[in-house]
Amino acid sequence: MRHKPTKDLTLPHQTIPTYALYGEFLSGSLVDDIHHEPLHERSSRHGWDIQLHRHRQLAQVFVFRSPGVFIRAGEIEFITTQGTVLFVPPMVTHGFRFPQDTDGDVITLPAMLMDAVLATPRLITADQPDQFDPVAQTLHLLARAFHAMGAE
């Protein structure tokens, strides 16, 4: 689904920042081997608008449970209408516009864990339950395990 955003997420390629995690200019490595965040944690601090950016050494898997999320990832432009999983490999430009109180999660992984599997972004929607359900359930379990471990 193509959508003309109300606020332009397009920037010239050379001005697209490369972050560790969005808004954090670090080496590109993670403190945690796997990093989990509920989407509202970072996006609410940025006015529910995550500008185009990329990650040099990190891959991300997003689960969107709310409708109305505008996604731009590589050549993909999409607005969620149902549960959606998005895989974003390293160095792929991506950005989002979230409705307030969007429900979802993001898992950030070292690039080497996804490099061999995925070279371009990929969307899976809930109308593909044989693909969507296992990924969404796995990410939910990873998020629970991540938070159960605590700071140690």
Image: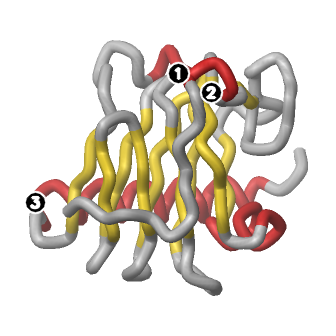
Q: Residue 100, percent across and down?
A: 63, 84
The residue lying toward the viewer, choosing from 78 and 150, is 78
Number of residues whose C-alpha sits closer than 10 Å to that of mark 2, classed few (under 14), some (14–19) or many (20 or more):
many
Question: Label 3 amino acid?
Answer: Asp
Q: Position of residue 35 (x, y in %)?
A: 68, 44
Please give the residue where the numbered disc 2 appears in the rendered image: 55
Mark 3 / mark 2, whichever is N-terminal: 2
The residue that label 3 is drawn on is 130
Neighbour class for label 1 at 10 Å: few (<14), some, many (≥20)?
some
Mark closest to the chain's N terminus, 1 or 3: 1
The residue under the point 31% across, 20% down is: 119
Q: Which residue is mark 1?
A: 91
Check disc 2 and report its element: helix, strand or loop: strand
Depicted 28 relative to depicted 37: above or below? above
Q: Residue 116 at what x, y percent from top left?
A: 33, 14
What is the secondary structure assignment of the residue under circle 1? loop
Amino acid carrying mark 2 in the image? His
Rendered residue at 30%/27% (across/down): 120
C-alpha gap between disc 3 and disc 2? 29 Å
